[in-house]
Amino acid sequence: MHKILPLTIILLTIPELCSYLYGEGKVRIPVTNSHYTLTTTLSLGSHPDHLRVLLNTASSETWVPSSDCDRRLTWCREHGHYNHRESKSHEDRHRNFTAHYQDNEVGGRVSADLVQIGDVILQGVEFGEALSSRTDFSYSGFDGVLGLGPAKVSSTGHPFLTELLAKGLDDTVFSFSLSSPDNASVVVGGVQYDSYTGNMVWSKIISPDRWQIEILDIKVGTTSLCSTGCVLEFNTEVEVIVGPLMQVEQLYQLVDAREIPGVTIRSVDCSKVEEFPNLTFIVKGVEFSVTPREYVESTKVGSTEFCFLMITSVEADVDRWIMGTLAHQPLYVAYDFGRNQIGLAQAVR
């Protein structure tokens, strides 16, 4: 549980606060990386409610469950809530929001309040109080969502990045550091130069509300999977790497991936993983690789080892490669909210 800073610090202007805390104009926010689900804690209100939120680069909406949601619903009953009645700094924005997702839709009202993330406190931050959800997400390891998408507007008000990045930070870049499960973080305010090797390659995004870039090719070993119209989408709402069905099928054949009834992930022979080819993404002539040990996950049950290919396709099929949280470990991804671009480099392994 995070501790709210003293009132004397709260009364500082935000630029002074950032300088007071960090000196270099960057904010480091602790992140929990549990089974490729990235969460952090938001503390909301003057009498703070501490809620776990998913760090979602696929959306700009930020919301948490409202204390006024229907407790007869499992998702409402099983999660933490924000109670605006307990906060002296709460402001009612007198409008509603709807957040759309591939498999869900969440709605409610828009509020503004004091928000603490890590050691940083922001005042008057807008977010949604969720009152309805089309599907039951009670099984998830988070209460709400912190939107980190590139869109400059959202139904829940000013995107959180707009609030944070406009308050005296050095730059409009944020990125994840996931090389160590016990020390994961997101840094806002600039590139983490110690987190990658080689040169950073920058590409303009091609969608106003998705972190998508065009690249030259995708290869598995020497086999080209996509030589024209190749698009990467960086999306932490997704845990693994998802690709177009026909292209992923080629990978399945190369590594002899076997179906598992009822799930999209396939199994592979653990004894052959070292022989598998790299998955390579070619961006502006520069190659970035994901090794077999990085796209295959192993687990032991008793003395028996099982291995699973963390690259898959989906029934609805997609026309792009979706680089989920798993891909952010071998690849260093810099999201530039101000310049609408993605920087890509090989992460320090």
Image (cartoon, rainbow, N blue to C red):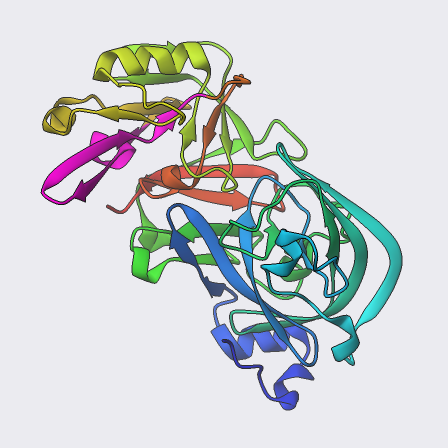
Closer to the camera, 60 or 173? 60
Q: Magenta residues? A: 288-313
349 horizontally vs 326: left or right: left
Would you place residue 151 above or below residue 24 in this image? Answer: above
Q: Residue at x 37, y 18 (%)?
A: 218
Would you place residue 257 above or below residue 207 in this image? Answer: above
Q: Residue at x 58, y 52 (%)?
A: 172
Give coordinates of residue 101: x percent, y percent. 65, 36
Number of marks in the image?
0
Closer to the camera, 122 or 243? 243
Give coordinates of residue 50: x percent, y percent. 58, 71
Give coordinates of residue 227: x percent, y percent. 41, 10
Does residue 48 show up magenta in the picture?
no
Does residue 293 show up magenta in the picture?
yes
| Residue that protrudes farthest toward the right in the picture | 94
Q: Residue at x 62, y 32 (%)?
A: 102
Would you place residue 122 above or below residue 221 in this image? Answer: below
Q: Quadrant of residue 82?
A: bottom right
| Residue 22 visible to an observer of this rendering | yes
| Residue that protrudes farthest toward the front in the picture | 72
Give coordinates of residue 184: x percent, y percent. 37, 58
* Type of secondary structure dominating the magenta stretch: strand
250 horizontally vs 136: left or right: left
Would you place residue 208 above or below residue 94 in this image? Answer: above
Q: Residue at x 51, y 76 (%)?
A: 2
| Residue 222 visible to an observer of this rendering | no
